Image (tube, rainbow, N blue to C red):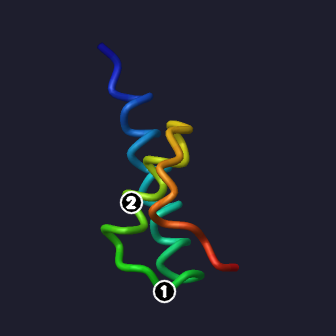
C-alpha cells in the first residue's frame, strides 16, 4: 500500500479545517467534521457556513 493518497487526504482535511477555523470561528473539531461531511457529499446540514 502507498501512504501518499491517505496522507494527501489527511492534509486536505487539516487545511480545510484550519480555513474554517479562521473564517467561520468554529472549533477545530467542528471544522474537521464539516469538512468530512462536505467532502463526502453527505450534507447533514447541522453545520452551515455563514460567510
Q: Residue at x 46, y 58 (%)?
A: 34
Few, some or many C-alpha atoms within 10 Å of disc 1 (few <14, some 14-19, many ≥20)? Answer: few
Label 2 sits on a secondary structure element that is helix
Quick one: 18 or 1, which is closer to the camera?
A: 18
Report which residue position mark 2 lands on.
32
Q: Residue at x 37, y 32 (%)?
A: 6
Q: Residue at x 56, y 67 (%)?
A: 48
In the picture, the quarter occupied by the C terminus is bottom right
Give the percent coordinates (x, y) of residue 22: 53, 83
Few, some or many C-alpha atoms within 10 Å of disc 2 (few <14, some 14-19, many ≥20)? Answer: many
Q: Is residue 15 above or below residue 49?
A: above
Give the percent coordinates (x, y) of residue 20: 53, 72
Give the number of the disc on residue 8: none
Residue extending furthest bottom?
A: 25
Q: Residue at x 36, y 68 (%)?
A: 30
Quick one: 5 or 30, which is closer to the camera?
A: 30
Give the number of the disc on residue 25: 1
Kindly report the distance in space between the C-alpha atoms of the residues bearing marks 1 and 2: 13 Å
Label 1 sits on a secondary structure element that is loop
Amino acid at each position: 500500500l502507498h501512504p501518499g493518497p491517505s496522507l494527501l487526504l489527511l492534509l486536505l482535511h487539516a487545511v480545510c479545517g484550519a480555513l474554517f477555523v479562521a473564517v467561520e470561528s468554529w472549533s477545530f473539531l467542528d471544522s474537521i467534521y464539516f469538512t468530512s461531511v462536505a467532502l463526502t457529499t453527505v450534507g447533514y446540514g447541522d453545520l452551515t457556513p455563514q460567510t
